[in-house]
Amino acid sequence: MSNEELGLQFLPMQDTDIDVIIKNERRAYSHPWTEGIFRDCLASGNECWMLMVAQRIVGHAILSMGAGESHLLNICVNPEFQGQGFGEQLLVHIVERAIVNRCSCVFLEVRASNLTAYKLYERQGFNEIGIRKNYYPGHMGGEDALVLVKELILE
């Protein structure tokens, strides 16, 4: 089935979408982003995208760009829709946005404990290049972040 047949589409995030985005974020993460962070990302001109399935926001991603590089700041799929390939489609879309914007690479951080996400990034050509100690907040202290990068080939 094609994306159209599934009712799947990518749309730029708007201020009016933030309430639903935050609900998805809170369902997915123990330490979700705040409304203010999303509003700042929109106001600063970051690439802020939503994944829609049958007119429902099921995921979102935020990409920051500068100096010819990009940084995936946030990617989230509502837990009700996880395990169906939507995260991978969202990641592919955001990497395509980096290419369109002439970025040479995409950086990201992932919790060291998030093996599902790590494997997804690895499948999509990301490579581990470092560790940020105690980067993520946790219930019992900080958690390390693995820093990954994907080099992009620009034509």
Image (spheres, helix red, strand yellow):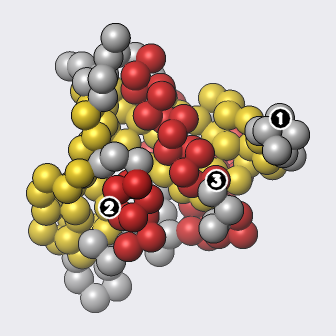
What residue sits right under mark 2 in the picture? 110
119 left or right of 4?
A: left
Which quadrant of the rendered structure holds the C terminus?
top left
- Image coordinates for residue 63, horizontal then vertical, percent: 41, 35
Label 3: how many Cα within 10 Å (few below 14, some 14–19, many 20+): many
Is residue 108 shown to the viewer in this render? no
Label 1: how many Cα within 10 Å (few below 14, some 14–19, many 20+): few
Give above or below for 97 relative to 120.
above
User: Which label sits on residue 69?
Assistant: none
Sequence order check: which comes first, mark 2 or mark 3? 3
Three-letter code for the amino acid on which mark 2 is drawn: Val
**Which mark is in front, 1 or 2?**
1
User: Which label sits on residue 86?
Assistant: 3
Label 2: how many Cα within 10 Å (few below 14, some 14–19, many 20+): many
Q: How many marks?
A: 3
- Image coordinates for residue 27, horizontal then vertical, percent: 62, 70
Is residue 151 shown to the viewer in this render? yes
Which of the 4 image quadrants contains residue 140?
bottom left
Element marked by disc 3 = helix
- Which residue corresponds to the image point at 40% horizontal and 22% vertical from the top-left? 99
